[in-house]
Image (cartoon, helix red, strand yellow):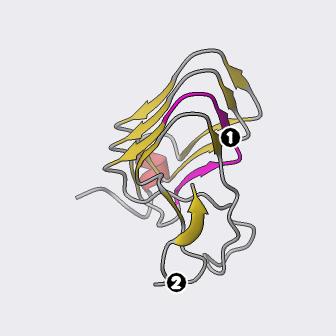
Amino acid sequence: MRPQGIFALLGPPAYTTYEDSTVAGNVGLTGMTGCWLGLARVQVGGNVRVIDDQMADPDAIEIVLNQIQGNLNCQDNSMVWDSGDLSEDLYPRAPQPNTVGGNRIGQCVLASPATEGGPPGPGPF
């Protein structure tokens, strides 16, 4: 069982974010824990792998608006979103999809649902 509540004070960093940057090669975010993980507006020259990341917050992994030349692979994560959280409410959500030159694999295949309990969004993640 993962700690909650004062998790940010006693555990790993409260959040990890990679934003507004360029990576010539691959990005791998694997086995991370915390309260929030974001990859936003990053130009990636290779592949992005988001594997087995377990966050305490229900909308804690946000992969949005990235330009990825290779593959986008998301597997075994607590939950992955392709939409930003612009308010304190989780829903409704507006998609902010990634541009992917290769394949979308695992949790990154379909867009996040726009409404709670709703079907996956209509477009690619």
At 68% from the left edge and 61% from the top edge, which residue is drawn?
A: 84
Crowding near pointer 2: few (<14 within 10 Å), some, many (20+)? few
- Give the quarter of the image for residue 33: top left
Q: Give how far across and how far down residue 119 sits, in percent.
A: 48, 79
At 32% from the left edge and 57% from the top edge, which residue is drawn?
A: 3
- Between 70 and 81, the one lying in front of the other is 70
68 part of magenta stretch = yes
Mark drawn on residue 17: none
Q: Which residue is mark 1?
A: 66
Tell me if label 2 and label 1 are in contact, CB under 8 Å. Answer: no
Residue type marked 2: Glu
- Between 75 and 6, the one lying in front of the other is 75
28 part of magenta stretch = no
- Looking at this view, name the residue that lies furthest to the top: 24
Q: Give how far across and how far down residue 114 sits, in percent.
A: 61, 77
Q: Secondary structure at mark 2?
A: loop
Residue type marked 1: Asn
- Between 50 and 6, the one lying in front of the other is 50
Q: How far separated are the C-alphas under marks 2 and 1?
A: 24 Å
- Looking at this view, name the residue that lies furthest to the left: 1
At 66% from the left edge and 80% from the top edge, which residue is drawn?
A: 92
Q: Secondary structure at mark 1?
A: loop
Quadrant including the C terminus: bottom right
- Give the quarter of the image for residue 70: top right
Mark drawn on residue 116: 2
Q: Give how far across and how far down residue 86 sits, in percent.
A: 75, 67
Q: Tag count in the figure? A: 2
Instruction: Look at the image and tell me whether residue 26 can be seen.
Output: yes
42 versus 62 height, above or below? above
| Highlighted magenta segment, given as a residue range | 60-71
| Residue 41 horizontal side relative to residue 26, left or right | right
